[in-house]
Amino acid sequence: MSLFLIAEVGINHNGDMSIAKQLIDSAADAGFDAVKFQKRTIDDVYTQEFLDAPRESPWGTTQRAQKEGLEFTKDQYKEISDYCAIKKISWSASAWDLRAQEFINGFDCTFNKVASPMLGHIPLLKLIAATQKKAFISTGMSTLEEIDRVVEIFQNAKCEFELMHCNSTYPMKEEDANLLCIPMLRERYKVNVGYSGHESSLLKVCAAAVALGATSIERHITLDRAMYGSDQAASIETSSLIGFVDAVRKIPAILGSGSKTLTDSEKSAREKLRISKES
């Protein structure tokens, strides 16, 4: 099975369509299969008290101004959809509330993504499962019992899904990756399991995840990790994307089949170098 690579734009576009398109360009040119955004209905996700609280940002001095500054409109998402079609790359967005998922359902996305914080939002999970589109489900911040419940929802809806092992810290320390959860989840639920990473390092953790059988990889991407935003430091800069994709896609071939056979190149070397003595 081929490795499915998702470039998580998330909110790293900072509300700027030009930045969003540059990130889409870089992901498509590097060979990612998809880009993913995040969608929130601000007044559904956050309380009025929170939105009124002070916060300095490029958009103003309140939490509301910051949150609204990071959201794209319907017309802007139509522009994103059209642009991804031109670039021949799939796209989707992870919804943080019911209205946001209904918004996403209005587009012809080929898959859904469940963010780790949403694993306790049962109405949202049921709405996503009802679309019958494949769902990638991140499992950060969750217990096995909580994952059991999510899996049951998607199985009952007969909706295809893939779990993604995840540690929801930004950035994640490499020693917290706990990648042996990948084969554990695969064995427990008999489904494909990917990896959604938030580490600041480029390749080590993702390479190990693929070696352990991850069937998908999701990483945040950015133009510059020093840019404004909470996710930038845990992202891969666009200048490194081509090398990243090339490396992780080669890992299955490097691992091989596990069968001990003589390759053609070894046969040639054997004829020159093999020493045979019976006694």
Image (cartoon, rainbow, N blue to C red):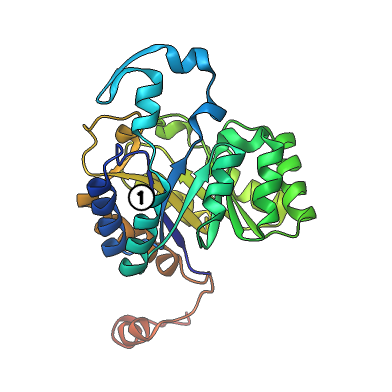
Question: Which residue occupies the foreground of this view, 64 or 191?
Answer: 64
**Residue at the spot of label 1:** 76
The residue under the point 58% across, 30% down is 141
- Residue 195 location, x and y as percent? 50, 48
Q: Amino acid at mark 1?
A: Gln
Tell whether 156 sits left or right of 196. right
Q: Is residue 189 above or below residue 270?
A: above
The residue under the point 75% across, 35% down is 145
Alpha-carbon neighbours of circle 1 within 10 Å: few (<14), some, or many (≥20)?
Answer: some
- Residue 9 location, x and y as percent? 36, 46
The residue under the point 31% across, 62% down is 28
Question: Which residue occupies the foreground of this view, 143 or 276?
Answer: 143
Q: Is residue 129 visible?
A: yes
Q: Is residue 112 above or below residue 87?
A: above
- Residue 243 location, x and y as percent? 25, 57
The residue under the point 46% across, 70% down is 256
Secondary-structure class at tag 1: helix
Q: Is residue 7 visible?
A: no
- Residue 259 location, x and y as percent? 54, 74
